[in-house]
Image (tube, rainbow, N blue to C red):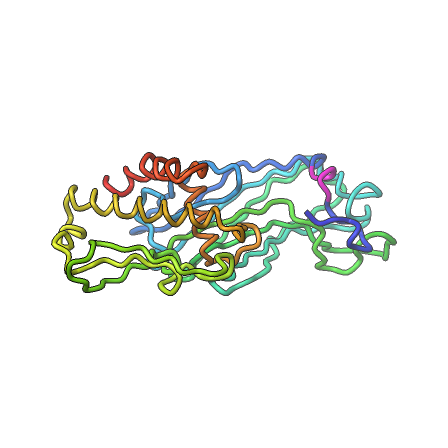
Amino acid sequence: MIKNSLFLYKTLNNQLLDKINIEIIDTTFSYEEKGENIKLTIDNNEFEKYYLGSVPEYWEPDEKELNIHRTFKLNNVETLFGDEGIAPHNSSIGLGVKIYSKSAQFSKNIDLGYELDNTMSELTFDFNYSFAPSTLRGSVFIEIFFFSKNNQTTNLGFANEQGINLGVINNFEIIVDGDGAAFPIVEVQRKGEPLWKLVMNWTDLNNENFDLENIRLEINVKHQMYDYIFKDAKPSRFLLFEIMTNVMAQIIYKAFNDNLYDPVSAEEESITRVVNYWIEAYSIDTNSLESINYSLQSNFEDEMVG
């Protein structure tokens, strides 16, 4: 949250947020299929992180658009104005949204088209946005914020320039499985050696990407069981599940116990961010290698084996 001590004008703080009493009425993610609007089934997430890679519907970020809808209700709008607020009585406040993603390489600010003044007691408003196919990858961050809209006079202690950000009222993260989230797998030819081998070769997992150079699963095509891995049959899927569970457990255990592991400051496509995604998405118990393995088996098997 923005702190008033950093600015020469008043900005939003937690006390004022409580007074406004912001409600999130509805949140939906959807896409169009043959003229029909299909909603994605996403579990409620108290941390405001939405994992789109595990939805049961057939949605692919490279093939389908993503439509986002969220409805807000602001109660006690009048508390935003006056000495205890963030704008003088003779002014108005706008609502904007910042959408940005380092992995998808874009950032934009949008005016949502609302104008709040001190005569209003409450406001219900919608945020709608559509991402075109092939524009999403990695993590996308969305911030809804107040900004100074229209000031009639200069007021000491308040932002007097139009467009100044007065504070974020809501933010959430969309985590997309796409090309950047694919598990690095390579085929090797090693007669007489095991079916698979995991290579973990990182130095700084917070900044190094989850890619072939740093992590990879090597599948031995010369092994007698190779032909059974990718067949469309339950035994084959179960074999692949056992391999992937073992591999993911080793990566999670090593990364989580790395002294540098820090999901907060890590780069978006780093090893740390991928591991943190697994931990949160599959409710991993990280107390030991055994508990990690068991968590994966319990929460991942239905998805892999089906």
Residue at 32%, 44% in the rendered image: 57
| x, y percent for residue 55 | 35, 43
In the image, is residue 84 part of the stretch drawn in magenta?
no
Give the vertical position of 171 relative to 298 (above or below): below
For this view, does 35 lie left or right of residue 84? Answer: left
Res. 189 image quadrant:
bottom left
Res. 214 image quadrant:
bottom left
For this view, does 252 lie left or right of residue 80? Answer: left
Image quarter (top left, top right, bottom left or bottom right) of the C terminus: top left
Residue at 52%, 36% in the rendered image: 46
What's the magenta bit mostly, secondary-structure-wise? helix
Residue at 42%, 52% in the rendered image: 176
**Residue nearest the viewer, comparing 272 with 11:** 272
- Give the magenta part as a residue range: 13-17
| x, y percent for residue 167 | 69, 49
**Residue nearest the viewer, comparing 138 with 93:** 138
Res. 213 image quadrant:
bottom left
Residue at 81%, 46% in the rendered image: 89
